[in-house]
Amino acid sequence: MPLTVHVDGAPHPARPGQTVAAVLLSTGRVSWRETRHGGRPRGVFCGIGVCYDCLVTVNGLAGVRACRREVREGDRIETASPAAGGGALGGPPPEAAPRTGAPAVDVPGAVPQPGRESAPAADEPVGGPVVPSPVVEAPAAPPPDEPPRGTAGTGSGA
């Protein structure tokens, strides 16, 4: 049974179990807020609720992680998009904007973002070869009847 949610005042269809981020991505949005310092666009980054890049306001509650919150019938989702008067990037990118490069990660259906460098090829090493760390073992403890090394009574007495 489909749901209806409101994104910045406009109704959008959603499915039960779908996250707020999935609904926003399905509307063509790749970002829906900006960083406090520098005004850099943010949307879904980690997708597991660790990075806090996907914050939105849901039903008046600010700071909701869009990647973790499942939508419910009638949810009111507010982004910091220009449509909501927030001034952040939001909505689908303009069709006239040139798209260059490749997505940072090869994700099926991902839209290349302007200014992003292409990801390295699968067979191209990133950061050099992987070298295992050497295993360092702690020295064995002396037997209980032997005095610890470097204490009085173990030297020549000179």
Image (spheres, rainbow, N blue to C red):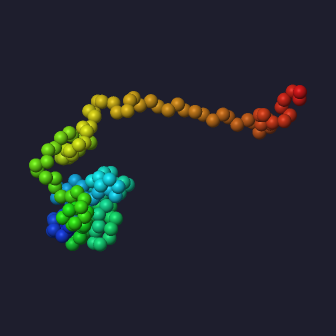
- State the residue lying farthest toward the right: 158
Looking at the rendering, in which quadrant would you find the C terminus? Answer: top right
Q: Is residue 142 left or right of residue 32?
A: right
Q: Nearer the viewer, residue 13 or 119?
A: 119
**Image point 21% across, 46% down: which residue?**
113
**Residue 3, percent across and down?**
18, 68
**Image point 25% across, 64% down: which residue?**
86
In this rendering, the count of numbered labels is 0
Q: Quadrant of residue 105?
A: top left
Q: Nearer the viewer, residue 136 or 35?
A: 35
**Residue 146, percent across and down?**
79, 35
**Image point 15% across, 68% down: which residue?**
11
Q: Is residue 73 above or below residue 147?
A: below
Q: Quadrant of residue 153?
A: top right
Q: Is residue 141 left or right of residue 80?
A: right
Q: Is residue 79 visible?
A: no
Looking at the rendering, in which quadrant would you find the N terminus? Answer: bottom left
Q: Is residue 133 left or right of residue 136?
A: left
**Residue 106, percent across and down?**
24, 41
**Residue 14, percent across and down?**
18, 64
- State the residue lying farthest toward the left: 96
Q: Is residue 52 above or below residue 127?
A: below
**Image point 29% across, 72% down: which residue?**
60
Q: Quadrant of residue 32?
A: bottom left
Q: Is residue 78 visible?
A: yes
Q: Nearer the viewer, residue 81 or 18?
A: 81
